[in-house]
Amino acid sequence: MRAFTECLPLPLFLLPDDIIILFKTPPNGTVTVNVTTPDGRTFTVYSDPPVELDFRKSPPMAQSIIRNSGMNFTMDERITMMVTGKVLNVIFSRREGESWMPVRGTYIFTVSASSEPYLKVAGEAYCPMWTDTFGRDLWSAFLWGTRQTLELVFSIAATAVLLGLLLGLAGSLSSKSGSAVDFASQVSMMLPMIPILIAFVPILQRVSYYGSLSVPVWDFAIVLGLLLFGRISRNIKTMAVVEKSKEYARALGGSKWWVTKHHVMRIVLPHALSEFILLSAKALALISILVSSG
C-alpha cells in the first residue's frame, strides 16, 4: 500500500462538475482517499474496497463524503445533495447559513492504494476558457483549432488571388485569352458556392486510421479558390487593359510582357493584396457556415 498525492488548484469561483479517481491497474485491498482543503480541513472522503471512485455519481462515494465531512446534515439535506449532485459542495465550499461559498486555493488529494491513481477533473473551473464536461482544456483546443482554421483560410485566399492575378494578366494580353478569362470569371461568379461546397465535402473527405473524417486542406482550398477567383480576375484584367492603353506605355516601345512586368504589376499587386485580406475574412465566414451546417 502506497500513498499518492495530487494537488488541485481552484482558481475561480466555480466548482468542478465532478472528480473521478482512476487507476492504471486495478488496485487490491482497501482504497483510502483523504482531502486537505485550503482552509485547513482534512477528512477522509473514502476508505473501503475499490468501487467506482466518482465523487458525484457514485452513491457509496457520496455517502462517504457526507458522513466523513464533520458537518451535520438532516436526512432531507443528504438526499437532496445526492440527487442534485451537490456533494462536491462539502469539499470545495464553506457553508454560510443556507448558502455555500467556494473556497479558493489548493486542495490536496492523498490516495492510499496498491496501484498508482490519477485524478480526472470535469467542469468549467480551470484554464482561461475553462474546460468541457470531460475535463478537457478548451483554451488548448481553441488554439489548436485556430491554427488549422487559419491555415485553411490563408490557403483559400492565396489560391483565389493567385488564380485571379494570373488569369487576369493573361486575359489582358490578347482578345482571345481575354474572352476566355471573361467566360471563366463569369462562370465562377454564377456558380452557387454553398451547395457546391456541401456537395464536395463528401467527395473530398478521407477516413483516417481511427475512423475520423477529414478534408485535405489544399483540395478544399483549390475548390473554393475556383469559386472565388472570378471577380478578382475581371478586376485585374480591367486594370491591366486600362494601364496598357495609356500613351506613355505605347511611347516606351516595350513589348506587352515588358509593360506588364514594369508598369502593370505595380498597379495590380496592391489590389491583389487588398483582395487577399478581404477574401481571408470571407473564407473564414464560409468555413463557419459549413461547420455550423455540418
Image (spheres, rainbow, N blue to C red):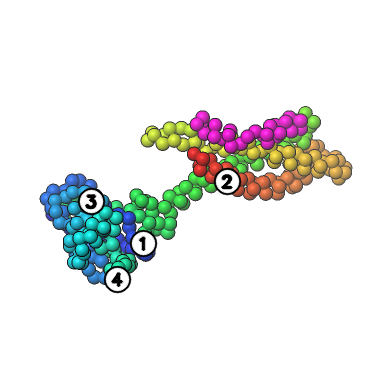
Q: Residue at x 49, y 49 (%)?
A: 146
Label 2 or label 1, whichever comes before in sequence order: 1
Considering the numbered disc 4 on the image, is that residue within a helix, a strand or a loop? strand
Is residue 248 at least partly visible in the picture?
yes
Real-space Cα separation, disc 2 to disc 1, in angstroms:
33 Å
Real-space Cα separation, disc 1 to disc 3, in angstroms:
21 Å
Residue 129 location (% of width, % of height):
43, 57
Q: Residue at x 63, y 34 (%)?
A: 192
Considering the numbered disc 3 on the image, is that residue within a helix, a strand or a loop? loop
Identify the residue under disc 3: 58
* Amino acid type, mark 1: Leu
The image shows a total of numbered marks equal to 4
Local crowd size for mark 3, using a 10 Å CA cut-off: few (<14), some (14–19), many (≥20): some
Identify the residue under disc 1: 14
Asked whether the residues under the numbered discs 4 and 1 touch, taking CB atoms below 8 Å apart as contact, a structural biologist would say: no
Q: Is-magenta flag for residue 41?
A: no
Q: Residue at x 68, y 32 (%)?
A: 187
Q: Which mark is residue 285?
A: 2
Q: Is residue 89 left or right of residue 233?
A: left
Identify the magenta region. 177-204
Real-space Cα separation, disc 2 to disc 4, in angstroms:
49 Å
Query: In this rendering, which labeled residue sits more in front, label 4 or label 3?
Result: 4
